Image: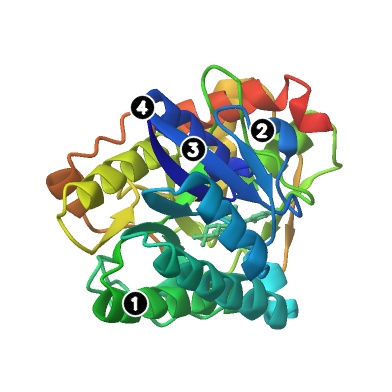
Amino acid sequence: MTTVLVTGGAGYIGSHACKALKAAGFTPVTYDSLITGWEDAVKFGPFEKGDLLDRARLDEVFATYQPVAVMHFAALSQVGESMKIPGLYWKNNVMGSLNLIEAAVDAGVKSFVFSSTCATYGEHDNVVLDEMTEQLPINAYGASKRAVEDILANFGEANGLDHVIFRYFNVAGGDPEGEVGEHHRPETHLIPIMLEAIDGKRPALTIFGTDYDTPDGTCIRDYVHVCDLVEAHVLGLKWLLDGKGSRVFNLGTGDGFSVREVIDRSRAVTNKDVPYEEGPRRAGDCTKLVSGSTRAESELGWTPARSTMQQMIEDAYRWHRTGHYNK
Ligand code: UFG
């Protein structure tokens, strides 16, 4: 079977990707430091503990498994934290990725799938965000991901490292079979925090800013189901293995939801009110991030079938109540 090295395979998106890769006939080898990941989320292939900054360990893992491709999820991904401790993001996300890319090239890998973000676009008033939109990140997280995109472009030219870059919008939901799900420590994402507030695990959700230039004053985001997102990765991997070359794809649905709209939708799923309070803006948050591209649909044949807000909250809520969430 064809082996793929999955960095961050013990994390939220990476663990769902491993499940999808296995279902598609690949062997996913997880490489994860467990700083933010969970060993018991590694269920679909071998596990190798290691840090991206440890080149010797990376070389050892490449030599052992000889993967045909790398899927690179491992990263710090909190916008707020990146504004407070930017050095962490430049070290882990940029230096760590450079280390990984060099190790992959030296091991003869020719195909690389990278998880980037719509946070690389930054603030664009009334502009439809597609893959050609200028990348002007306003937070260190987005800047670190854009830097890795640049590194990949250089290694693509110089070393023939073909790469598919996915710029995610807001990932939500969980495996409908409940084998894996979203679990961050500390939790910072809107939907899981909202579910914790609903179930009394925290006193209230704080809405970060109600004075944005949007219809209800709260930030607007484009939410995409994690299972749809990882299906796109399998399609991106096949695209590379078929020799179709480097390409960038947005992964979003094109539908924007404000924070208040997400809160409203949750009532229909949970039959419970969300205790919330209104607070100040969170540093680094863009007003509106919504995808304006259908490139992934038209070129990869991607269908984001599960990405309705109702389904994402339903799947997140089921996982949230299984107990895995409460470790
Ligand atoms: N929000 C709140 N209260 C909370 C948490 C979030 O009001 O307690 C708001 C945020 O201000 C934002 C929206 O809910 O407007 C979504 O916030 P998340 O933290 O869930 O997601 P982000 O948009 O900040 O970031 C996520 C990923 C990033 C990715 C980004 C792209 O964490 O990796 O989506 O938008 F880059």
Q: Secondary structure at mark 3?
A: strand
Q: State the CA–CA distance, disc 1 to disc 3.
A: 24 Å
Q: State the CA–CA distance, disc 2 to disc 1.
A: 31 Å
How crowded pointer 1 is (Cα within 10 Å; few <14, some 14-19, many 20+) is rated as some
What amino acid type should be assigned to the residue bearing mark 2? Ala
Quadrant (top left/top right/bottom left/bottom right) for the C terminus: top right
Indicate how the structure is coloured in the image: rainbow
Label 1 residue near ligand 1, CB within 8 Å: no
How crowded pointer 4 is (Cα within 10 Å; few <14, some 14-19, many 20+) is rated as few
83 displayed left or right of 245: right
Q: Give the label, 4 or 2, closer to the camera.
A: 4
Q: Secondary structure at mark 2?
A: helix
Residue designated by label 2: 41
What amino acid type should be assigned to the residue bearing mark 1? Phe
Pinpoint residue 61: horizontal percent, then vertical percent.
58, 52
Quadrant (top left/top right/bottom left/bottom right) for the N terminus: top left
Asked if the residues shown at circle 3 and circle 4 are in contact, with their CB atoms under 8 angstroms apart, the answer is: no
What amino acid type should be assigned to the residue bearing mark 3? Pro
